[in-house]
């Protein structure tokens, strides 16, 4: 199946050249890249391609490594739904899902109230209902969702609280909320949760990056890693 446009393939080749050049001058980066498995490298390279930012390589965390990507891929192969915190992320993932495994892609705001409750956000308020709907369907076998959080740190914190209270754990959290308010705190909570995760440290993130990480896993379901 042809999934990669020639421009994308050429871009990945350039990204690899630039990463290797940077690693030649930075021992820490060289060790970091050497410790990544093929699937992790695919995710990293697709995130760099999506962002145009080679400097995110040291801040992209896989936990456990290398198990997080493999767990996410296994869940997608088993038909896990993909829950996105924004319509933008869902729109970026849905075409790849259709072309590969056909996983259901849903937006968190489908369960959001029309108005944000006092002291809360619409996305955080939607988490409990969305999670119940996706994990308690008696007509479907349980497939823990893969969760993409690129814009809503409050939703990430609420999801972690729901899971800590005993709800089904996600198969994988791609946690990359962007911004400056509550973002660092939510990422620290994700790091401490022990959940399988792909996390981008610092203030960077966004819908494009979480979608790029998920699309790398979907692509890997049908194709081997791009040849070096």
Image (cartoon, grey):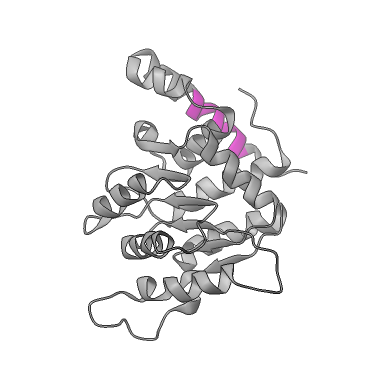
Q: Residue at x 35, y 55 (%)?
A: 177
Q: Is residue 38 above or below residue 223?
A: above
In the image, residue 17 above or below residue 189: above
- Of the 4 image quadrants, the one containing the N terminus is top right
The single residue placed furthest to the front in the displayed view is 166
What main secondary structure does the magenta stretch of the protein show?
Answer: helix
Q: Is residue 102 left or right of residue 204?
A: right
Q: Quarter of the image holding residue 201? A: top left
Closer to the camera, 52 or 158? 158
Give the magenta-colored segment's residue range: 7-16
Residue at horizontal 40 percent and vertical 84 percent from the top: 113
Question: Left or right: 79 with respect to 30?
Answer: right
Whole-percent x, y for residue 124 in the image = 36, 71
Please state the horizontal and vertical placement of residue 126, each as a whole percent of the image: 42, 75
Residue drawn at x 33%, y 14% is 25
- Residue most toward the right? 1
Q: How far across and how far down the image is residue 73, in percent? A: 62, 45
Image quarter hosting the C terminus: top right
Task: Look at the image and say whether residue 9 sits in the magenta stretch.
Answer: yes
- Let me know if residue 222 appears in the view: yes
Please state the horizontal and vertical placement of residue 64, each as a whole percent of the image: 47, 36
């Amino acid at each position: 199946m042809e999934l990669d446009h020639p421009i994308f393939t050429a871009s990945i080749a350039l990204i690899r050249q630039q990463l290797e050049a940077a690693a030649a001058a930075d021992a820490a980066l060289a060790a970091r890249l050497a410790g990544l498995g093929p699937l992790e490298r695919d995710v990293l390279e697709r995130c760099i391609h999506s962002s145009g930012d080679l400097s995110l390589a040291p801040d992209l965390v896989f936990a456990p490594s290398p198990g997080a990507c493999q767990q996410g891929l296994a869940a997608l192969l088993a038909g896990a739904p993909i829950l996105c915190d924004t319509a933008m992320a869902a729109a970026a993932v849905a075409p790849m899902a259709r072309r590969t495994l056909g996983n259901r892609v849903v937006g968190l705001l489908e369960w959001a109230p029309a108005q944000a409750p006092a002291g809360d956000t619409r996305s955080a308020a939607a988490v409990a209902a969305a999670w119940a709907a996706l994990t308690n369907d008696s007509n479907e076998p349980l497939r823990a969702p893969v969760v993409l959080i690129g814009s809503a740190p409050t939703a990430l914190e609420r999801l972690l609280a729901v899971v800590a209270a005993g709800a089904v754990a996600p198969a994988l959290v791609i946690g990359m909320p962007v911004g400056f308010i509550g973002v660092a705190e939510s990422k620290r909570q994700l790091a401490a949760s022990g959940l399988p995760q792909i996390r981008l440290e610092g203030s960077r993130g966004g819908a494009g990056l979480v979608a790029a990480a998920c699309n790398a896993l979907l692509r890997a379901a049908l194709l081997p890693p791009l040849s070096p």
